[in-house]
Image (cartoon, coloured by chain):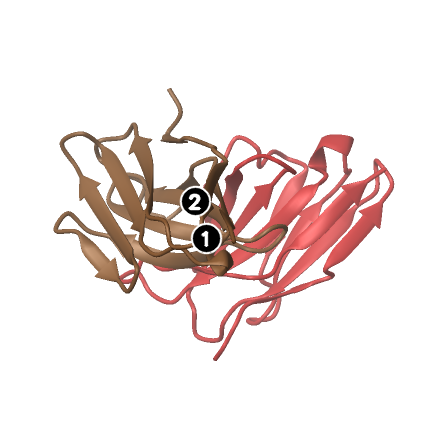
Chain colours: A red, B brown
Amino acid sequence: EPEVTQTPSHQVTQMGQEVILRCVPISNHLYFYWYRQILGQKVEFLVSFYNNEISEKSEIFDDQFSVERPDGSNFTLKIRSTKLEDSAMYFCASRPTASTDTQYFGPGTRLTVL
Amino acid sequence: RKEVEQDPGPFNVPEGATVAFNCTYSNSASQSFFWYRQDCRKEPKLLMSVYSSGNEDGRFTAQLNRASQYISLLIRDSKLSDSATYLCVVIGSSNTGKLIFGQGTTLQVKP
């Protein structure tokens, strides 16, 4: 069964450094999402992406964040200058078409900012 | 008011028990409703969609009451493997399909 993959599974970085989290959505899916979950808190929406552009972003998704689909298979989340409060699990999800609501989640990347 | 509100629990029940979780949502224009399951430090996994007519999948039954903006999940004959956090999830009025998650309700099934 196809699945969403994410790399790395765990990323440790120093405050102020740039990180890129990578996701490979399910092939032929058209809608892509990033969510994050700070330890002990709820899953929060960051951004949605469709047709090579951002379709919606949350207040969390400020100028430090960007997303890209560079080659038709990868979907990346970049944090330019990480802060301690960016430490969280980051989940990528994809959805096949507009007619289905189901999103398929990747296993997540745990980001630790020191 | 939180967009999606759940009792965080934990609910500690013996094997074989029936347990019910509730959830309320604030946006009356919300379109779709789900229960997800999340194991510790893992990704959310879809358990079932929730429809106004109610739906059942084995030991799991979900109900939606649009008038009260209330969603429920009933688990019958609890198994040890049901121990997890159950997330109430809503798609709001946005047409992007973004999911809005509740805090989750933790279930611990004990032998």
Mark 1 in CB contact with mark 2 (< 8 angstroms): yes
Q: Position of residue A91 (x, y in %)?
A: 58, 53
Quarter of the image holding residue B93? top left
The residue lying at 84 percent from left, 36 percent from top is A15
Q: Position of residue A58 (x, y in %)?
A: 50, 35
Q: Is residue A52 visible in this depiction of the protein?
A: no
Q: Find residue A66 and name its label.
A: none
**Residue for badge 1:** B37
Q: Give the chain letter at badge 2.
A: B
B108 vs B35, nearest the viewer: B108
Q: Secondary structure at mark 2?
A: strand
Q: Is residue A3 visible in this depiction of the protein?
A: yes
Relative to A114, is A74 on the left or the right? left
A20 vs B69, nearest the viewer: B69
- Please identify the residue farthest to the bottom as the structure is shown: A1
The residue lying at 63 percent from left, 37 percent from top is A38
Identified by mark 2, the residue type is: Leu
Identified by mark 1, the residue type is: Arg
Vertical position of residue B51 compared to residue B90: above or below? below
Query: How packed is label 2: few (under 14 Cα within 10 Å), some, or many (20 or more)?
Result: many
Please tell me which of labels 1 and 2 falls first in the chain: 1
The residue lying at 20 percent from left, 43 percent from top is B64
Quarter of the image holding residue B60? bottom left
**Residue for badge 2:** B87
Relative to B109, is B29 on the left or the right? left
Q: Position of residue A85 (x, y in %)?
A: 72, 31
